[in-house]
Image (cartoon, rainbow, N blue to C red):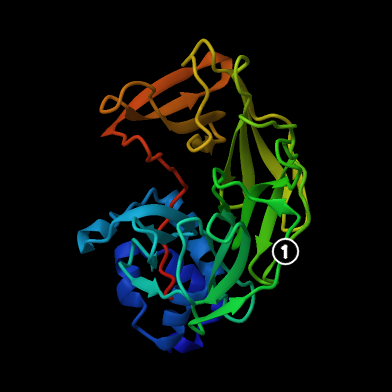
Amino acid sequence: MISDLPRDMEEEVLSKLPMTSLRRARFTCKRWNNTLSKDWSFTRKYNGEAAKRKESQPIGKLDDAGVDIINVFHCQGLLLCVTKDGTRLIVWNPFTGQTRWIKPRDSYHRCDRYALGYEKKNNYPLKVLRFVDDYYRNLNRRVYKFEIFNLNSSSWKVVDFNPDWIIPYIYPGLSLKGNTYWFAENKVAPGKIGRVFLLCFNFTTESFGPRLRLPFRGRYGDTLTLSSVREEQLAVLFQECAPVYILKVWISSKVGPSAVSWNKVFLSVDMRPLIGFQFHCFAGSFFVDEKNNAVVVIDKTRGLPFTIRNMAYVLGENGYFKSVDLGDFAPMKCWPLVCSYVPSLVKF
C-alpha cells in the first residue's frame, strides 16, 4: 500500500518525479497531498533534486488576469504582490497558479511595508507581516502599525511595538529560511545619520531579533542590498558612494534570527572604470555564482527618459566584466528585481 511507505522512502520517490507529474501525484492519496503541499522540508529536497536534473518549468503571469503589480516579495517559490494602487494584496504561486487575496484589517496604505514568511511549527503556516513607520502630515506625527496575517486562520493580529530603529523605505527585505532580513538604522536626531545594521523578523516568535552585525561600516548614500545563496546563507552587496565606487560582496558563514557571522570578502571590484556610476539604492539586486566566483547585478542604464534600459552586469575575478541588455525599456520610477526562484507546490 502507498500509505505504508516509510516517510523517508516516500519523499525519496516523490523527489525523483518531474514537475509535471507532481501535480497529478498530489491527488493519489491524502498523505502525499500533505507532503507536497504543506511540507517545506520536502520542497527544499525536491528543489535540490530538480536542480541536479536541470529541470525547468514555465510559470504563469499574474497580469494575464488583469492584475497590475507595483511591488513583490519572494519567499521560497511564493510571491506576495502589492497592486499598483496600493490598496490590494495578493499571494501568488506562479507554478501552480494559485492566488489568494488578503483583505486588510482596516485599510492598506501607500507607505506600508510587507514580508511573507512561515512559522517553523504547527504545519508551517504562512504569514504576512505588514508594518508602517512613517510621518503622517495630516496627523502631524509618526504612525507605527505592526500587524500579522495568518493564512491558515485568515485573521489579522495587531502587534504592540514601538521600535527605536527605522527600516528606510529604500531597503527591500529578503526572505531566508522562512524569516525576513532588513537593513535598519538607529533613530537619531533630525539631520543626523544613524548607523546601519541588520534585523531579522522571526515569523515563529512573531518578533524582531537583536541588531545583527554587518561586515562593513556604511554611510548615507551607499548602495546596500541583500541576496541569498542556496537558500541557506545571506549575501550582502555594499558599494561606496562617489568618488570611490568600490563594490564588495560578502557571504555569511552562519545566519539566524539572533546571530550572523561573515566569511571574508567574496568579491571586490572597482566599478569606476567599468560603468562609471554607482548602482542605485533602489536597485542593485543581485545573485551570486559561487562556482564561477561571480556576481550578477541588475540595474538600469543612466540617461534620458525612454532611453533607459534594464541591464545585467556580470562581475568576476581578475577584472572580468560583461554587461547584458535585458531588452526592456525601464520606466523612470520602476526598478528591476532579481531573486533566486524555484517552483513550489505549497498550497495556502
From the viewer's perspective, tell me whether residue 171 is left or right of residue 69.
Answer: right
Residue 227 lies, in percent from the top left, at 56, 44
Image: 261 above or below 312: below
Q: Nearer the viewer, residue 5 or 203?
A: 203
Tell me where residue 219 sits by quadrant. top right
Residue 246: x and y, percent? 62, 20
Q: Is residue 89 above or below residue 2?
A: above
Q: Position of residue 77 (x, y in %)?
A: 44, 59
Residue 143 visible in image: yes
Query: In this picture, is 116 found above or below 290?
Result: below
The amino acid type, in three-letter code, at marker 1 is Asn
Q: Residue shown at 22%/61% (left/top)? A: 66
Residue denoted by label 1: 162
Residue lying at the far top of the rendered structure: 273
Q: Residue at x 37, y 41 (%)?
A: 334
Residue at image position (63%, 63%) is 144
Asked whether the viewer can see residue 60, the reply is: no
Instruction: Work out which quarter of the rendered image holds the N terminus and state it.
Output: bottom left
Of 163 and 11, nearer the camera is 163
The image quadrant of residue 8 is bottom right
Decide which of 38, 15 is in the foreground and name it: 38
Which image quadrant for residue 148?
bottom right
SS for dot 1: loop
Neighbourhood count class around disc 1 (C-alpha, 10 Å): few under 14, some 14–19, many 20 upward: few
Quick one: 224 or 318, which is closer to the camera? 224
